[in-house]
Amino acid sequence: MEAVKTVILLTLMTLLMVWVGGIFGGQSGMLIALAIAGVMNFFSYFYSDKLVLRHYHAVEVDERSAPGLLEIVRRLSEKAGIPMPKVYIIPESVPNAFATGRNPSHAAVAVTEGLLELLDEEEVEAVLAHELSHVRHYDILIGTIAATIAGAIAWIANIMQFGAIFGGRDNNSPNPILMLVMSIILPLAAGIIQMAVSRSREFEADAGAARLTGHPEWLASALMKLENYNRRGMLPEATPETAHMFIVNPFTGKDFSFANLFRTHPTTEQRIERLEQLRREMGA
């Protein structure tokens, strides 16, 4: 099922690029766009995870630099039955975390320095269990590719907006009004593509973390702390295209009333309520 969703996402991006190429350059533009889309599809599948880690200045750690963190990840990986992923720390005080990669054999987990400072060891373990649940269920493949596609769409929208304002006036130029309208619509399309990374995945990863640790309340406590902190401060390097990858939305503190229609995360209250229900079930 995940392979099918990935193919659909890549196909949508290809069709979009070809369509825009046709608007700008006719048949020749479509062929050029098709070639560019092919390269982007290949690149996003094999290298988009590296781009995300580089964007957030993530630094890989080893046994000497973070032995306790690696021990938690190793223990949870064994319980989840997946290979040990690479572990990264993001030099940023705002607490958050994400997982990336194309499959469990090529996965990475990244946490910020702020998360390690804010949470206690049990809460850190719960957050890592959540991210490893994403790895286990191949959510990271869809999430990483969706981030690349959303970024490509935002880039196309900027080009169309620039062309609409400063484009030529000859008969061969694209309609500036159409380009301006599409520059508004395309970012909304990016939001819809990110919603392809269903909110239900967060609930499933929360449940997976609760079962891995045996303590749903650990993750509930961690989510509450992360939510409260992110309401006060935003991750400086955060982008809308990668927001869905984090355990809590890095734009929590922003007042995006319209953007809430395209939320990539359930509310923290909903997630904690589900975890509390799971705690009662596990206790029974």
Image (spheres, rainbow, N blue to C red):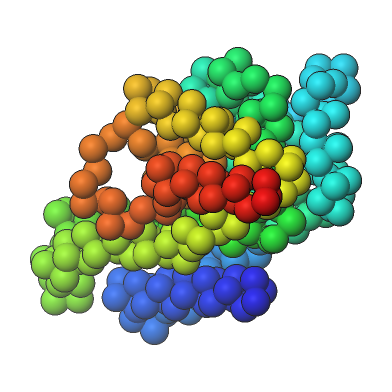
In-front residue for pair 55/269? 269
**Badge count:** 0
Q: Residue at x 43, y 32 (%)?
A: 227
Q: Residue at x 80, y 36 (%)?
A: 73
Residue 109 shows in the view: no
In-front residue for pair 7/232? 232
In-front residue for pair 121/185? 121
Residue 229 position, x and y percent, is: 42, 23
Residue 94 sits above or below residue 278 on the image: above
| Residue 63 relative to residue 122: left or right | right
| Residue 85 relative to residue 128: left or right | right
Q: Residue furthest front?
A: 284
Residue 209 position, x and y percent, is: 67, 46
Give the quarter of the image for residue 171: bottom left
Residue 112 position, x and y percent, is: 59, 26
Give the quarter of the image for residue 21: bottom left
Q: Residue at x 85, y 29 (%)?
A: 71
